[in-house]
């Protein structure tokens, strides 16, 4: 074949074309900012630039990019880790539609009535608990926006204060297990989802605790932000206790069963998710909320969200493969390694990049496209991959809270309408961004916050 040397030489040139890879990445970000669907933009960019990368002049229609796309689609379909996603989603949607969260919020509100900002504390606690039963960010913010925001405004709470609480609390689902994001991260980084779940428990609830300390302190210093409830409107203690027993205890048992079976090694995430899905159906039945409409809506939303996640994986793996083939990963890795950074400098640089990316992009683009660029460098800098994962998970909280793409603010604005301006929501979530950054600094100085539980349950990772 006289043309083989020429084809081989051209393919080598393509492999050393980082400028094309940078063009590919820049064009992807530009199209996403224009509003194009992320998954299909990834696929289109991957196929388009992949056709160029694998181009053979003598065979226009037998390009290797189509084989790569087919193989990536099949790999997603047979990935055992991703089986947990639809089951956890189904559990969350069933719990959401069974009015369990409504009962939980109002019972916690009464139980914490003696604290400053009791309704805000109850809203944060409800978000944290619902996050462990759902992991769906949009669902938590939307539901609490419909449930807690009007209740707080009616009780005389400052609208900005109330909106900040709901936006910050609603994003906890991205961190607290069973987080869908952690399952996606496990599949991307080829890490154990069991260890990731164990590593996320302390940081997730620590962040929720810091949020609560902040709202209690601010309500104590400025009582006009969060007036105390009128004692005449508070029911007797036995009524409050009964409401807690019928709302908090069943959901807590479901959560402990799911997470406990994972941490104790009794079940894989997929098996625990199946237990959770069945438990969600059982709770809905006990609360007399299980009907054909609820079941149909939950199945439809589960299928819709699962399909989105799967196509994201297909697109991202195709995009990443072509980007790496063109030399994109290599040029970024060489650029960072050429700086001769210390491990702490590397971590600061990466987290700063992810934080800045959170301004225009959502967590899905950041996690699927940009995080894999840094993963191969962890061994070079001696960084524990699970510790790095928790830093990233905490940092990704900011992607929901940083304007102009602060999706938590848009979710809330979508359900409260003209009751509050978007700019006021943006201002109200700024203190919670500072709390996230403070938590990241704290965890960097005390890594056992993230590593103690996985090491305790599964042994020290080698």
Image: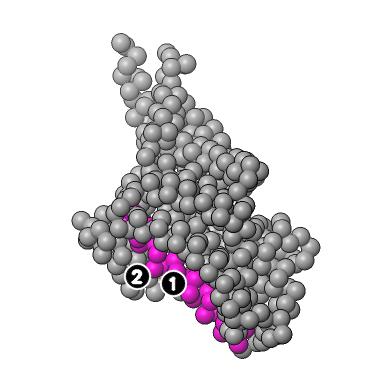
Residue under pointer 2: 449
The answer to which quarter of the image holds residue 198 is bottom left
355 up-or-down from 53: above or below: below
Q: Is residue 197 magenta?
A: yes
| Residue drawn at x 47%, y 16% as measured from the top left | 61
Residue under pointer 1: 206
Q: Secondary structure at mark 1?
A: helix
Dominant secondary structure of the magenta stretch? helix
* Residue nearer the viewer, 260 or 418: 260
- Contact between marks 1 and 2 (CB within 8 A): the answer is yes
Residue 258 horizontal/vertical position (percent): 41, 55
| Rendered image coloring scheme | one colour
* Residue nearer the viewer, 215 or 362: 215
Q: Which residues are magenta?
A: 194-220
* Residue nearer the viewer, 333 or 338: 333
128 up-or-down from 117: above or below: above
Residue 274 horizontal/vertical position (percent): 43, 46
| Residue drawn at x 77%, y 66% as measured from the top left | 419
């Amino acid at each position: 074949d006289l043309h083989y040397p020429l084809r081989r030489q051209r393919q080598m040139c393509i492999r050393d074309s980082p400028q094309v890879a940078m063009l590919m990445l820049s064009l992807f970000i530009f199209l996403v900012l224009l509003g194009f669907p992320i998954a299909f933009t990834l696929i289109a960019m991957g196929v388009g630039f992949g056709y160029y990368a694998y181009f053979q002049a003598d065979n226009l229609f037998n390009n290797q990019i189509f084989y790569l796309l087919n193989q990536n689609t099949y790999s997603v379909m047979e990935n055992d880790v991703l089986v947990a996603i639809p089951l956890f989603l189904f559990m969350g949607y069933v719990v959401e539609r069974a009015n369990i969260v409504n009962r939980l919020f109002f019972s916690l509100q009464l139980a914490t009535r003696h604290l400053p900002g009791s309704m805000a504390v109850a809203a944060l606690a409800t978000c944290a608990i619902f996050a462990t039963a759902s992991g769906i960010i949009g669902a938590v913010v939307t539901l609490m926006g419909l449930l807690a925001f009007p209740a707080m405004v009616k009780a005389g709470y400052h609208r900005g204060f109330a909106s900040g609480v709901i936006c910050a609390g609603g994003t906890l689902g991205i961190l607290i297990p069973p987080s869908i994001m952690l399952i996606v991260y496990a599949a991307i980084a080829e890490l154990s989802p069991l260890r990731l779940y164990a590593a996320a428990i302390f940081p997730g609830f620590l962040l929720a605790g810091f949020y609560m300390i902040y709202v209690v302190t601010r309500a104590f210093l400025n009582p006009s932000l969060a007036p105390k409830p009128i004692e005449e409107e508070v029911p007797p203690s036995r009524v409050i206790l009964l409401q807690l027993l019928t709302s908090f205890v069943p959901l807590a048992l479901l959560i402990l069963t799911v997470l406990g079976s994972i941490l104790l090694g009794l079940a894989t995430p997929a098996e625990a998710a199946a237990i959770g899905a069945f438990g969600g159906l059982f709770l809905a039945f006990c609360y007399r909320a299980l009907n054909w409409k609820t079941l149909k809506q939950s199945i439809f939303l589960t299928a819709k969200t699962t399909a989105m996640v799967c196509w994201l994986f297909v697109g991202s793996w195709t995009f990443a493969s072509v980007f790496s083939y063109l030399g994109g990963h290599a040029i970024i890795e060489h650029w960072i390694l050429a700086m001769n950074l210390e491990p702490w400098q590397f971590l600061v640089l990466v987290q700063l990049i992810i934080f800045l990316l959170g301004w225009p992009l959502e967590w899905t683009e950041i996690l699927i496209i940009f995080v894999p660029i840094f993963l191969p460098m962890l061994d070079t800098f001696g960084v524990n991959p699970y510790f790095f994962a928790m830093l990233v998970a905490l940092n990704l909280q900011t992607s929901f809270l940083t304007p102009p793409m602060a999706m938590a603010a848009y979710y809330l604005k979508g359900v409260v309408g003209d009751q509050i301006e978007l700019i006021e929501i943006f201002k109200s979530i700024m203190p919670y961004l500072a709390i996230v950054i403070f938590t990241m600094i704290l965890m960097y100085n005390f890594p056992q916050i993230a590593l103690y539980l996985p090491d305790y349950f599964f042994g020290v990772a080698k």
